[in-house]
Amino acid sequence: MDAIKNVVTDMNSKMKFKEAEIIQLPKHFDRRGNLSVIEGLTHIPFKIERTYWIYDVPGGEIRGGHAYKQNQEFIVALSGSFDVCLDNGIVQKTYPLNRSYYGLYVPKGVWRQMGNFSTNALALVMASIRFDPQDYIYDYEVFTRLAKESRI
Ligand code: TYD
């Protein structure tokens, strides 16, 4: 949790995440209940190859702590709240997610952690490739070296 809390949110840095962004989703308000939708390549910039979700996270736990070489993701807080911390090897930025009608697009080659999960948090993650353990970079030193050399 300290890792999440200590992340510096540097909004003024000239080193911006070029592609990571909060994307608003369509909202169909209805007295019977609201509806939002995600279509790959329409609302998010990739074709959805895989969907997974993270739930029942015990208080204080951190998920992620890795980067992907190719995989892109779109993360939505379907229920509850959590923070996604992104790090491009130079700048770190924290995105609090707490609504089901927007999400965070995470490009490839970005170190990401998820933490500060509320009790009822449900994180829906759409991914651009099928699960591939070879696509993961777990070593932060390796990640920062690749990022600084623009090799990821
Ligand atoms: P992992 O990606 O390490 O989770 P997190 O980044 O949230 O900490 O995945 C945890 C476990 O789930 C790991 O054993 C791999 C497995 N897994 C799959 O089998 N398929 C998937 O699509 C994902 C995302 C994970």
Image: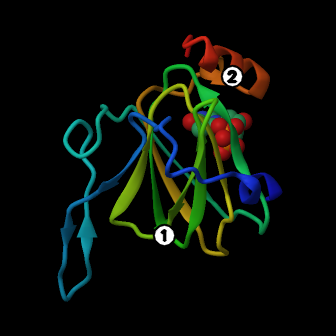
> Which residue occupies 64% across, 15% down?
146
- What distance separates the C-alpha of mark 1 from that of mark 2? 28 Å
Q: Is 82 left or right of 126, judged from the image as shown? A: right
- Name the kind of residue labelled 1 in the image: Asn
Q: Is 42 left or right of 77, judged from the image as shown? A: left
> In the image, which disc is placed on residue 98?
1
Q: Position of residue 64 (x, y in %)?
A: 68, 43
The quadrant of the rendered image in which ligand 1 is seen is top right
Front residue of 57/22: it is: 22
Give the quarter of the figure containing the N terminus.
bottom right
- Name the kind of residue labelled 2 in the image: Phe
> Which residue occupies 31% across, 32% down?
46
Q: What element carries label 1?
A: loop
Q: Where is residue 137 in the image (x, y as percent from the top left)?
A: 68, 23
Q: Is mark 2 on a helix, strand or loop?
A: helix
Disc 1 residue: CB within 8 Å of ligand 1: no
Q: Position of residue 98 (x, y in %)?
A: 48, 69
Q: Of label 1 and label 2, which has the lower sequence position? A: 1
> In the image, which disc is placed on residue 143?
2
